[in-house]
Image (tube, coloured by chain):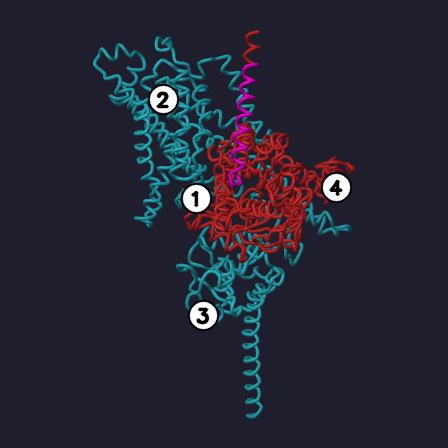
Amino acid sequence: MLGLRKVAGLVAGAAMMATSALGLGAAQAADDVIKVGVLHSLSGTMAISETTLKDAVLMMVDDLNKNGGLLGKKVEAVVVDPASDWPLFAEKARELIEVEKVDVVFGCWTSVSRKSVLPVFEELNSMLFYPVQYEGEESSRNVFYTGAAPNQQAIPAVEYLMSEEGGNVKRWVLAGTDYVYPRTTNKILEAFLKSKGVADEDIMISYTPFGHSDWQTIVSDIKKFGSEGKKTAVVSTINGDANVPFYKELGNQGIEASDIPVVAFSVGEEELAGLDTGPLVGHLAAWNYFMSVEDENNDTFIKKWHAFIGDEDRVTNDPMEATYIGFKMWEQAVKQAGTTDIDAVRQAMYGQEVKNLTGGTAVMNSNHHLSKPVLIGEIQDDGQIETVWSTDGVVKGDAWSDFIPESAKLTADWTYPFVCGGCEKAMY
Amino acid sequence: MRIEFKTLLAGLLLVFAIQFSAQAQSFDSAAEGLLAKSYKDKIQAVEIIAATGDARSAPLLEALLAGDLFTRKSDKLLVIGNKASGGYDIVNALTGEALGSVKKREVRKIRINNKMRGLIKGLLGGLTLLNDDPNLRLKAADAVFKSRPAEMRTPIEQALATETDPTVTKALERTLAALKLTHAQSSEEQLAAVEMLEGMADPQVKSLLSAEGRKLQAIKDPTDAELQLALAVDAALAKIDEKLAFLNIIENIFQGVSLGSVLLLAAIGLAITFGVMGVINMAHGEMVMIGAYTTYMVQQLFLNFAPDMMNFSLLVAIPAAFLVSGACGIGIERSIIRFLYGRPLETLLATWGLSLILQQFVRTIFGPTNKEVSSPDWLSGTWEVTGGLALTYNRIGIILFAAAVLILLMLVLRKTAFGLQMRAVTQNRQMAASMGIRTGWVDAMTFGLGSGVAGMAGVALSQIDNVSPNLGQAYIIDSFMVVVFGGVGNLWGTLVGALSLGITNKFLEPYTGAVLAKILVLVVIILFIQKRPRGLFALKGRAVEN
């Protein structure tokens, strides 16, 4: 009984706190401030990648304020640190929305952190911009995905390697870290390869734990797999820190890109920064942005970034461009809607256009994914990635893969008459 | 007669002149072809450039391969650029005329892809086959082996005739056999080539033969000679497979020992702080991390003050890391751990908190991104034992280093006065104290020694893993596993534990994959600990009771 009373007391306390938070929120809303939440890990394993994105958002906010703010109001960034702890992401997201009353949130990197905050954003009807390439198979009304879907990264990369120019690859190693993004991407790739007539025996799939550091066996297995007389390539969805020892082992065992090229979906300029790239020249990466692309917008962006961070050696990368595009689109949508009200801004988002940093224009589709160009580049000895191939125009992000039978049937479209993130038939 | 002779001479001269200018012209226009957008056109241009035999072609192709070939945006002129402050110093790629310096964005790099890179390496290989440096000759022979252009056959034969170095000779023979097989003039020659290749078991030869075998099988109505060749190829492949399978076992053992030596290095410091002193030190991994960052700092110092001595920076980093991590360890012992002796749960929580503090501290100072620690030349690359077996130098280095650290530590514990005092204190504190040993001082020094050894492990790990604030976390669980499995308080146990875990892991991995192998090893350890709670080498006697 005592226990029950305690619980009741707790609930009452929580309710009181919630009302006081509401009151506080109302008082703040009267202030002339628009709040932007930043939900990126600043400590723990993911800090290496996510800290940069926090800085990118701060730079954009800074830039916006210098140009007079938004709707005549000052924009304020609220930064929290979910510390690479997935359940903490959900707690911090709730804190940002309920306590800080932010109008929009930019954040998350790993798919598991996104999955953890998803229910919070849907329950409280808020808006998240997710800036990282991911496995697809999702479209939430409350999330805008500005990174690449599999058909904007993985599929074009494999198609390139299959082509004459890419080396006519016939045998495939799919190597990844053991979690949801690589597993789903590899499932899609396997189905795609089989649809192109690649036999089972020509596909090798290997998973490793997070932070794996002893790559000897896997690299020598790859070497053996590649000695069957057919051109072999590695498609790597290895994530985070584990890439450095992987590439070091490749270099040490003398696997050159002209023998067995490795195309990576999670290795960008930032990851290469801690690495001597001499032995890696020619290995590939597939993204929607490279720092080396010559474009006026890109030059300005890099210059701004260097000025903001105060370090000429810092690099830019694809998730930063995705953050940039997302932020610009949100800014335009708010201007267009004339308010930061979530539902009004969401309606204004559809069809919103922003110039890519690599040329061309990115468009937000009604499935909450972008249309962007796809670039394939080769790693250079200075740690940069030079484009060797790109799509002619933009590719529309596909929330549900056509190569997985059960999801090929689904459509994501948040406009009338569909109004659904994954249905076979229209809702209305 | 005279007139005829004169006309003949004039005619000959004319032919020469035309040919010469034609060659120069084709070189120039082929070089222009490098400006093309499509890689197909560029590849054609490269082939023509090499075929002209023009003296300028080698430097041009070398610049292209190195990424030093640019086009000036203003007039589409082909230039070779050398990095200078803020841009490049450029020279005309065709005439060699110096054109001053330009900014980065005024020139555009001529891009090459993997296919071109392989082709250029093969073509340039022909030019360095007679170089004075045997390493370059070896590289050239391998490059030609990989791309196998038909026209390289004569140069390879010529090079083979004058070659004196046995390794290069072997590589040249292999290349020649490959050329004979793929660009055969007769079926006897092909058979001889297969026989030659059969003796050189390595994955690349296997790849070549399998491709050839597949081609032969695809022939609808094979002739007798083709059938014979197919049989020979199959037999050769079977032989090579057999040899490679044997080498595979040796390789597995090496990899197991190598993983074991990494585990040993990570755990050996813990064997002292946890094993000997009984402190559950969750911040042990951070001592390793501090050692790795010390390596980075030492390399930065070398880079700034003695760039020529860079190759020796690791040798300086080893004692430096020992001192820095050791000093940290002594500081931690004096300020935190000494108040917590005999309270394992509090020690565990306090050191775990400390590990988080240290991580964030390093992250604040050095930033969250990885730091680049370079490998000296003598730790890069592979040692080709035979064709199919290549051992990487950095792994060999780490195995030797781990052995050296273990031996040194054994000597300190057994042969020095400090070692004696340390053992005395851990076995019976009161008795040791009453014999006049300053137990507090010995505790601090012991903890410092364990932490210092962890710092040295950090130097080794910086060669194979990321130098990031999270470095230590990856090794803490493994370290405890090794110490517990090997038997607390026994360095031999740590050695045997580390090696057996490493080798088991590496033999499981090819069958089960990396994730399952790790899980299986953990399950085995849990079962083992159930049976023998004190590990492999349990301490016996009175010391155990305390």
**Are marks 3 and 4 in one subunit?**
no
Judge whether residue B372 can be spotted in this image: yes
Q: Which of marks 3 and 2 precedes in the sequence?
A: 3
Q: Are marks 1 and 3 in contact (CB under 8 Å)?
A: no
**How far across and how far down the image is residue B304, in percent?**
32, 48
**Residue at mark 4:** A416
Q: CA distance from mark 2 to mark 4?
A: 66 Å
Chain ID of residue with mark 4: A
* Amino acid, disc 3: Gly
Q: Nearer the viewer, residue B275 or A308?
A: A308
Residue B442 in the image, given as x and y percentages of width and height? 27, 20
Q: Nearer the viewer, residue B309 or A96?
A: A96
Q: Residues within 10 Å of mark 2 (few under 14, many from 20)?
A: many
Q: Disc 2 or 1, which lies upstream in sequence?
A: 2
Seen in the picture, residue A319 relative to B51 is either above or below; the reply is above
Tell me what hue chain B is rendered in. cyan
Residue at mark 3: B96
> Please, is residue B330 above or below residue A190 in the view?
above
Circle 1 chain: B
Pointer 1 or 3: first along the chain: 3
Residue bearing the label numbered 1: B380
Asked if labels 4 and 3 touch by Cβ distance under 8 angstroms, the answer is: no
Dot 3: element: loop
**Count of marks, rendered view:** 4
Secondary structure, mark 1, is: loop
Residue range of the region highlighted in magenta in the rendering: A8-35
